[in-house]
Image: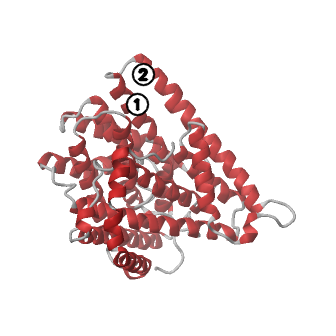
Amino acid sequence: MPLILSLSEATSIAAQGPRLEAHYIPILFALGAMILVIAWLPIVLKKLPLSLPIVCVGIGVVLFSFPPFSAWAPHPEKSPKLVERAAEMIVIVSLMGGGLKIERLVAWKSWNVTWRLLGIAMPLTILLVMLLGYHFLGLGLATALLFAGSLAPTDPVLAGDVQIEHDENEEEAEAKFALTSEAGLNDALAFPFIHLAIAIAAAGSLSGAVLTHWALDDVLWKLGAGLVFGAGLGRVIGWIIYRMPAGTALSRTGDGFIALGATLLVYALTEFAHGYGFLAVFVAGLTIRQSARGHDFNKRLHDFADESERLLMMLLLLLFGGMLAAGLLAPVGWKEAAFAGMMLLVIRPLAGWISLIGVKRPRLELGIIAFFGIRGLGSVYYLSYGFNHAAFEQQTSLWATLGLIIAGSILMHGILVTPALRWLHRHYHHLGIVETKEA
């Protein structure tokens, strides 16, 4: 899918040129200062009930509330293509980073919790959100399905605080592993539902022909192509990085930006083949990591992907703060607020808990896995993708509701993640799962 902006978006961006030029040096100063602050903040926030995304959004709200930046405050309805592509880029970089983190071999038993979250929690979330949107918000079938599909995946970008670290013991950190692997895979698995919503909107109704084409093309072909291209290209790239003979392996360069090149290459080739690039990128990251388990260069690749993700996340969350300052939440009424509360406090925790029934792990761990289904920039991508490919009703209201859900998720999960994981670590220690000293 090439990067194409609408004529109105391109014209609007070009019109900002002279205004940006007038404030060029102050903008460079502000950007440099914010990058340094963002690099420093994780050290300060490590033991506090506060997260980096909260700070980034807060800075964005303040920044875009005052001149001259207030005149540039973005809104997804004004530049839908730009929003879609910006969210797409941060998601694919995040997915590669997520794949490169995971050392555990893919297997049915060792990934049991992940399969349950994908096979039970995600479809159940889509069903519940769709029913709530249809009956409570008055959405049509196609729009309710689009909104449900957009909200179903947990976010690989904002979930950094609940994801496993590169060299963390995955047996001890089962909750982090489950949330990392879930976020890596469910972004791709949401796509068939988005395409079904688009097909229903285009056809005007759900028919046998629509379902047949959807099942063959959007489910079987695109998922299959994403899996095959991800595994195949990941294996080839892994061989080039680690296995090439005569001292020509790319790992000898020590350059971590190889991870970014691999991300873009895998995504583009899979999209050319009409497969799901999100799935391919995550699978490729897994496969590259498995090509040389325990190799020191794995950390270099992961660190570069992680740093790239943090920089992009900072910029996009600043813009999200600008959207809030521009009045994104203005259309929110009591129905939208109630819907957001149900999504965050009832639907995801309930669906997650049901999916984990029978799993023989500590109940506290299972509760944390069920609760920390963070919503974020992946949902922005899917909703903008749907709106850019078909006509759906109540777009302004849905953007406001999604904005409230994301803001609520960033705030709620960001405040709770540090004490929750600290509590879980103490619980692990008490049960003898963790034998090291408490952090």
Percent x, y of residue 336: 18, 47
Percent x, y of residue 419: 34, 72
Mark 1 is on which residue type?
Leu
Up-down relation of residue 193 to residue 299 (above or below): above
Dot 1: few (<14), some (14–19), or many (≥20) neighbours within 10 Å? many
Percent x, y of residue 294: 69, 67
Measure the C-alpha gap from mark 2 to mark 1: 8 Å
Q: Is residue 172 visible?
A: no
Pick the front one: 211 or 12: 12
Up-down relation of residue 425 to residue 177 (above or below): below
Dot 2: few (<14), some (14–19), or many (≥20) neighbours within 10 Å? some
Q: Quadrant of residue 124?
A: top left
The residue shown at (16%, 51%) is 332
Residue placed under numbered mark 2 in the picture: 210
Query: Disc 1 on helix, strand or loop?
Result: helix
Kindly check if marks 2 and 1 are in contact, taking CB atoms under 8 A apart as contact. Answer: yes
The residue shown at (73%, 70%) is 253
Query: Disc 2 on helix, strand or loop?
Result: helix
Up-down relation of residue 439 to residue 76 (above or below): below
Q: Is residue 298 left or right of residue 385?
A: right
Q: Is residue 310 left or right of residue 267?
A: left
Q: Residue furthest left?
A: 334
Residue 59 is marked as: none
Percent x, y of residue 162: 43, 64
Pick the front one: 152 or 57: 57
Mark 2 is on which residue type?
Val
The residue shown at (31%, 22%) is 204
Residue 196 is marked as: 1
